[in-house]
Amino acid sequence: IYEHLQLIFIFIHNKVFTLFTGCTLSETEREPETKYTGDSVLLSCSCEDPNTKPEDFRWTHVESSGTEVSSETPRYKDRVHTFHKTTPSNLSLLISNLTEDDQGTYRCTVNHKTSADTRLIVKGETVVMFLSSSSAGESVILPCSCEDPQTSPEHFEWTRAAVKETLVSDTEEINGRFQTIRDSPHNLFLRISNLTETDGGLYVCSVNGKQSRNVTLTLTDPAVINALDYQYYLIFLVFLLCLMLLLAAGCIFWRFARGTNTHNQQS
């Protein structure tokens, strides 16, 4: 009887020990996760046995000198959520509203022993800009768009460098002659109507308060263009006239030379 009781005690002890401490992670190497700024990501981490209850676990951001990823950490405050309170064996981490600074390797460590790493790649908005030119009285569209069409910037604004004023933004997309054109979430085009001579200059498109790109608007005077066109037309006429005179002179010289040769042969 004593031996049977001892076996039962050992069995119960092992079960209890495994229940609270024996978490064997289902995976230790995971495929990288690729997300975009503003998205959410679920980083998986769980025990193989769903009945286990790890005594201790923590998530850390390896590149930030092992910074703990929790609501107590300022950079992650109100952006992270775990599920172990309702499902003890589920140690997964949910991060919301991703930023480019969130990119890196995340490590799930259980009972200060076993760990699993997940690489997170966060793609930000790379803005592409071009040089534009137009004439007074017309309209122009200044392009500004994210390189990846799947991105949708949360915040953006167009400013004019000369006067340092905000023309349009995500909170005010129409402002008099200035209007945001977003035919696609990644496009942040600026339309300027009824251009004046004072509209020329440097414009800045800013995304999420971090990235910014410049576009220079050059205004041309139609009168100047017409004058230049007329000048080029006169030069062309003069050139054509000179060419015709040279051809006429060449023809006259050829006929004179031919007549002279004929006369000499008859003599």
Image (cartoon, rainbow, N blue to C red):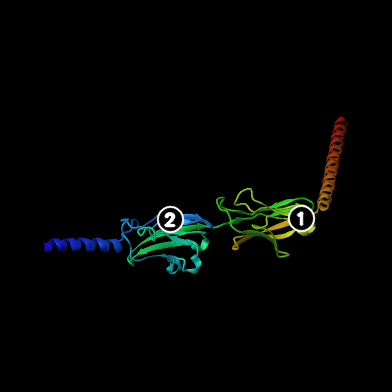
Q: Residue furthest top?
A: 266
Q: Nearer the viewer, residue 60 or 77?
A: 77
Against 181, residue 100 (above or below) is below
The spot of residue 15 in percent (x, y) is 25, 60
Task: Check disc 1 and report its element: helix, strand or loop.
Answer: strand
Q: Quadrant of residue 106?
A: bottom left
The spot of residue 25 in percent (x, y) is 33, 58
Residue at figure coordinates x 85%, y 43% from the top left: 241
Q: Nearer the viewer, residue 163 or 174?
A: 174
Amino acid type at mark 1: Leu
The spot of residue 69 in percent (x, y) is 44, 65
Task: Say left or right for 232 vs 114.
Answer: right
Q: Nearer the viewer, residue 135 or 251?
A: 135
Amino acid type at mark 2: Pro
Q: Nearer the viewer, mark 2 or mark 1?
A: 2
Mark 2 / mark 1, whichever is N-terminal: 2
Q: Where, quadrant-wise, is the N terminus in this rendering?
A: bottom left
Task: Check disc 2 and report its element: helix, strand or loop.
Answer: loop
Mark 1 Cα shell of 10 Å, populated few (<14), some (14-19), many (≥20): many
Q: CA distance from mark 2 to mark 1?
A: 48 Å
Mark 2 Cα shell of 10 Å, populated few (<14), some (14-19), many (≥20): some
Task: Say left or right for 183 vs 110.
Answer: right
Q: Residue furthest left?
A: 1
Q: Quadrant of residue 257?
A: top right
Residue at figure coordinates x 63%, y 58% from the top left: 156
Residue at figure coordinates x 13%, y 60% from the top left: 4
Q: Nearer the viewer, residue 218 or 89?
A: 89
Q: Which residue is mark 2?
A: 32
Q: Which residue is mark 1?
A: 219
